[in-house]
Image (cartoon, rainbow, N blue to C red):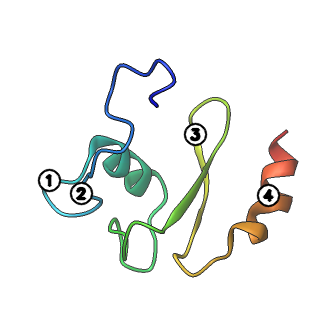
């Protein structure tokens, strides 16, 4: 089921390197990590506010529950 989406919902994308998807290029340029502008792998998490600004970046090993307080602070 695609819920009316007209774009690929589960498309595979590159998250680093010269063929990185534009979304990951934007995210990594806004919040650089230990590896600079790259991500270790696709479980790197980014918190984006309502204006589309990247507020914080989290390591791939960060559990989703650990983001709750940061998310609530933006609501």
Q: Which mark is residue 19?
A: 1
Left or right for 33, reference 70: left
49 on left or right of 43:
right
Residue 51, located in which quarter of the rendered image? top right
Residue depicted at x 67% and y 39%: 49
Which of the two marks, 4 or 2, is nearer to us in this view? 2
Give the CA separation, mark 3 to mark 4.
14 Å
Q: Nearer the viewer, mark 1 or mark 3?
A: 1
First-in-chain label (1 vs 2): 2
Q: In the visual, does 41 lie left or right of 68?
A: left
The Cα–Cα distance between marks 2 and 3, rounded to whole angstroms, is: 21 Å
Query: Can you identify the residue that label 3 sits on?
Result: 53
| Mark 2, residue position | 14
Between 9 and 43, the one lying in front of the other is 9
In the rendered image, which quarter contains the C terminus? top right
What distance separates the C-alpha of mark 4 from that of mark 2?
Answer: 27 Å
3 or 4: mark nearer the eye: 4
Badge 3 element: loop
Report if the CB atoms under discs 1 and 2 are less than 8 Å apart: yes
Residue at image x 36%, y 78%? 35
Q: Is residue 34 above or below residue 49?
A: below
- Which comes sooner in the sequence, label 4 or label 1? 1
At horizontal 77% and vertical 71% (from top left) the residue drawn is 66
Query: As displayed, is residue 36 above or below residue 72?
Result: below
Residue on which the image places disc 4: 70
Report x, y in % for residue 53: 57, 39
């Amino acid at each position: 089921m695609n819920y009316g989406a007209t774009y690929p919902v589960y498309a595979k994308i590159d998250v680093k390197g010269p063929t990185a998807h534009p979304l990951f290029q934007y995210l990594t340029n806004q919040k650089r990590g230990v590896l600079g502008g790259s991500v270790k792998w696709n479980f790197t998490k980014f918190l984006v506010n309502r204006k589309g600004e990247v507020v914080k970046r989290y390591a791939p090993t960060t559990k989703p529950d650990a983001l709750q307080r940061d998310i609530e602070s933006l609501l």
